[in-house]
Image (cartoon, rainbow, N blue to C red):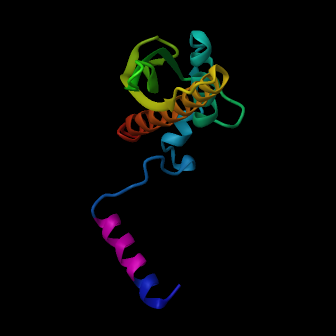
Amino acid sequence: MSLFKLTTVMAVLVVLQGCGFRPLYGDPSAGGSSAEFGLIKVEPIKDRIGQLLRNHLRTALNPKPRTQKPRYLLKTRVSKSTATLAVRKSAFATRANLTVAANFHLLNAATAKPLFSATRSITVSYNILDSEYATLAAEKDARIRAVRELSEDIRIQLGVYFSDLPN
């Protein structure tokens, strides 16, 4: 890295520090939102897509085994819908959008008092092909992509919530 680039990067970091910029997840040892993620118990979610979302959330929030009693419960409801697009002259659809929505609530584990609620949704597209197996495989891949993105979106929302809490 050249001296000019290094100087520019350092100047940008100093400016960001001065304007109050701080990382979303913070330093876990300083009690940032990453430390709070380890105290969340993700409740079971209905249906197969809910199971996939729960697994992704558990991994995204705390990849290590929980060592402490959970302080928070994350309850989630998932819904999905499919809309066909790009219709051929023969009236067969060739493209579809899969929308997966999650309504989630963060609760205090001891009192069941609601702390934070939000709804997030993700829309992904896939091809509807002549082969039924290929279409099912494309839909499954779209479902996996949607769940992965949705879990990351929920993680970001929780990170913002925890970063706004007073220490």
Which corner quadrant of the image does residue 55 belong to? top right
- Work out whether 93 lies above or below 164: above
Query: Front-most of 117 and 99?
Result: 99
Query: Front-most of 124 and 37?
Result: 124
Furthest-front residue in view?
90
> Where residue 52 appears, x then y in whole percent?
62, 23
Indicate left or right for 148 with 17 as reference: right
- Work out whether 151 lies above or below 13: above
Which span is picked out in magenta? 8-18
Q: Residue at x 59, y 10 (%)?
A: 47
Furthest-left residue in view?
19
Residue 42 visible, this angle: yes
Which corner quadrant of the image does residue 90 belong to? top left
Q: Residue at x 47, y 90 (%)?
A: 3
> Where residue 137 appears, x then y in whole percent?
64, 27
Indicate left or right for 37 with 164 as reference: right
Q: Is the magenta stretch mostly helix, strand or loop?
A: helix
Which quadrant does the C terminus fall into? Answer: top left
Residue 103 visible, this angle: no
Query: Front-most of 137 and 59?
Result: 137
Question: In the image, is residue 64 part of the stretch drawn in magenta?
Answer: no
- Work out whether 112 lies above or below 157: above
The mark total stands at 0
Question: In the image, is residue 11 part of the stretch drawn in magenta?
Answer: yes
> Where residue 161 appears, x then y in whole percent?
38, 34
